[in-house]
Amino acid sequence: MMAFETITVEDRGAARWIKLNRPRVLNAMNRQCIRESIVAVVEAGDATEVRSIVFTGAGERAFTAGADISELRDFGPREILSYNRDWLDLFRRIEASRKPVIAAVRGWATGGGTELSLACDFVLCTPSARFGLSEIKIGVIPGAGAGVRLTRWVGRLRAKELLMLGRLLPGPEAVEWQLANRCVEEDRLEAETMALCEELAQMAPLALGAAKATVNTGAEASFDVALEYELQEFVRLFASADQKEGMSAFLEKRPPRYTGN
């Protein structure tokens, strides 16, 4: 793994934890932080020993407060277009990764923090978490896909409520709005995240990737296209050693030993 300045990367068991590490600015992500996160996601995707990826924030106050406004305040259209393409690249790589990506959210997760969580496959949060897209309050809107993802996730009415009023949702309410899987006690966030990573590590890696890709594709493609895509993902798994191992283990009544092949 390469050396980073704005994030830290650590392997815990079969999970790779990417920690946004700018706590003095609530882990706000400048361009360097975005680009380092992209590299970390790519490296994790290429590492066969890594079964899942976790995004979290340093300190107790924030997951990430989103974009570093001090960096982009004086941008014009040309500069902000280039800058936001980095955000789009990060989120697309998270969604395209064949490995499950988890957001472990404590404290502020506004703006780009909520956008980041929307790109992840699982979101665990604490009561102190604050999700929201409050860009409207500084004269802009989200520019890295949140308006699109949010509408598809929660529907038009709720998306407009968040985008046009800049509402903040605490952890329990974020679960109700289906922006998070579950809300856990503050001192249980890491343990619950690790438990989820360990559960995922017991699954066949290729099948996990196929399930993720099928859901992501099915959410956007036409029904018939999505059905065909799911079928092709299913068929490809029958060329894997893990499919043979999984079915043999089932018939032999023993735990499977998956290798990702």
Image: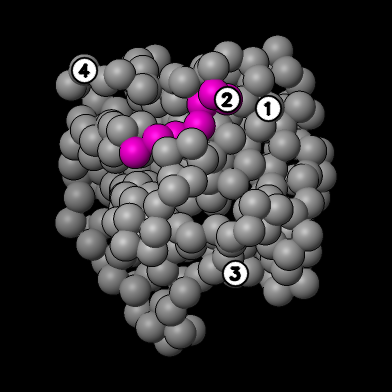
Above-or-below relation of 136 to 241: below
Above-or-below relation of 26 to 98: above
Residues at marks 3 and 1, CA–CA distance in whole angstroms: 25 Å
Rendered location of residue 92, percent (x, y): 35, 55
Residue under numbered circle 4: 3
Residue 107: image tag: 1
Residues at marks 1 and 4, CA–CA distance in whole angstroms: 27 Å
Which of the two discs, 2 and 3, labels the residue nearer the N terminus? 2
Which of the two discs, 4 and 3, labels the residue nearer the N terminus? 4
Q: Residues within 10 Å of mark 4 (few under 14, many from 20)?
A: few
Residues at marks 4 and 3, CA–CA distance in whole angstroms: 37 Å
Identify which residue is drawn at 76% across, 27% down.
128
Identify which residue is drawn at 47% across, 74% down.
220
Residue under numbered circle 2: 26
Which of the two discs, 3 and 1, labels the residue nearer the N terminus? 1
Q: Please state the total of marks drawn on the protein image.
A: 4
Rendered location of residue 117, percent (x, y): 55, 44
**Nearer to us in this view, 165 or 207:** 165
Element marked by disc 1: loop
Q: Is residue 150 visible?
A: yes
What type is the residue that disc 2 sits on?
Leu
What type is the residue that disc 4 sits on?
Ala
Residue under numbered circle 3: 152
